[in-house]
Amino acid sequence: MAMLREDEHMSTSRTRPLSLARLAGQLDLSVLLGIGAALTLLAIAIAASGSIGAFLDVPSMLIVLGGTAAITAAGYAPGDIASAASAGARALLRAAHSAGDVATEILELAAEARTKGPGSLHRILDDHATNDRVHRILALAAAGLPVDAIDALVERETRAGTQRLSTAAGMLRRAADVAPAMGLIGTLVGLVQMLGVLDTPSKIGPGMALALLTTLYGAVLAHLVLLPIAARLDRAAEDDERIANLCRLGAISIARQESLRTLELQLNSALPPAERPRYVD
């Protein structure tokens, strides 16, 4: 029953208004430039040796794009699909706060709490916390929850967020497996159409285009679009887990009223050297 009340506290913690810029984050140019560069190079190679229009075929697109979407969706619940769409959009955004920024903010909030007293932590979070997750998790310490309860709540929240991103990445990988298979199916359909009109040379072209372009579309969709985004989601899951762990360390340290030096050492132990803050002289 006590754990239920703690869960309710975590879910009903005050949500601070976020500006549009912080909510949307920034476009991750590495993802956009990588996929865009690959598609651009492919288009240049095609244009250099022929007409791009010859590589555009609506039936081939319907087989590969429509078939991949339909078969992938058949293996997941509607909620999973909606979650994957949201997570996929997130893969194109760069996090507004890096792990190093989060660690620095936790140290600043902990220093402010030590100066004004533990009882002022709620007000300090409301006034100065810029990261919503930092605000939400450190509020557990401000509420006076025991360390074990904080640890359990943060672990459950982290597991849920990581699972959502992992499910989305798995769905994209499933789609990447399906796309070449749909291309192969399109190839077989095109070959059957060709064999049916061998006595009419003028009708062979559409079947040949379907046979070849579906294979091309399937490979491009899988390896130039879906798999890079899935890899980005894996990275986002790792970043989420790292930031949640930093917040957990900060909340537990504040609950135990440990020194800033101890907190800094704990936070830095969870960060790569390049992102470790130097807060305590």
Image (cartoon, rainbow, N blue to C red):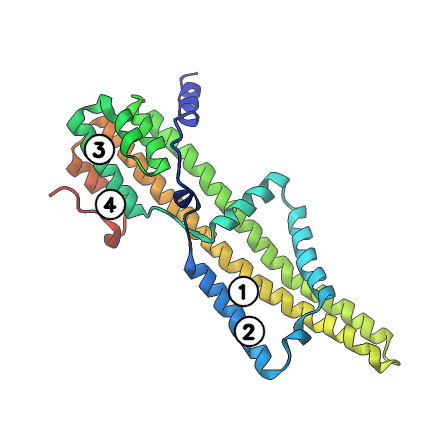
Residue 62 versus residue 160: which sits nearer the camera? 62
Q: Considering only order in the chain, which callout, 1 or 3, is on the residue closer to the N terminus?
A: 3
- Report the Cα–Cα distance between label 2 and label 1: 10 Å
Which is in the foreground here, disc 4 or disc 2?
2
Q: Position of residue 77 (x, y in %)?
A: 63, 40
Q: Position of residue 82 (x, y in %)?
A: 58, 42
Residue type highlighted by circle 3: Ala
- Report the Cα–Cα distance between label 4 and label 2: 44 Å
Mark 4 Cα-neighbour bin, 10 Å: few <14, some 14–19, many ≥20:
few
- Report the Cα–Cα distance between label 4 and label 1: 36 Å
Which residue, given by chain and number where applicable, does mark 4 sit on? Answer: 269
Instruction: Please give the name of the residue rendered at 23% of the width and 40% of the height, measured from the top-left corner.
Output: 266
Q: Considering only order in the chain, which callout, 2 or 4, is on the residue closer to the N terminus?
A: 2
Mark 4 and mark 2 residues within 8 Å of each other at the beta carbon: no
- Report the Cα–Cα distance between label 3 and label 1: 45 Å
Mark 2 and mark 1 residues within 8 Å of each other at the beta carbon: yes
Left or right placement of residue 80 versus residue 7 in this view: right
Residue 178 versus residue 49: which sits nearer the camera? 49
Which residue, given by chain and number where applicable, does mark 2 sit on? Answer: 42
Q: Is residue 184 above or below residue 133?
A: below
Q: Considering only order in the chain, which callout, 4 or 3, is on the residue closer to the N terminus?
A: 3
Instruction: Please give the name of the residue rendered at 17% of the width and 25% of the height, measured from the top-left corner.
Output: 116
Which residue, given by chain and number where applicable, does mark 1 sit on? Answer: 224
Which is in the foreground here, disc 3 or disc 4?
3
**Quadrant where the image shows the N terminus:** top left
Residue type highlighted by circle 4: Ser
Q: Residue lying farthest top?
A: 1
Mark 1 Cα-neighbour bin, 10 Å: few <14, some 14–19, many ≥20:
some
Residue 93 versus residue 228: which sits nearer the camera? 93
Which residue, given by chain and number where applicable, does mark 3 sit on? Answer: 110
Q: Considering only order in the chain, which callout, 1 or 4, is on the residue closer to the N terminus?
A: 1
SS at mark 3 in the image: helix
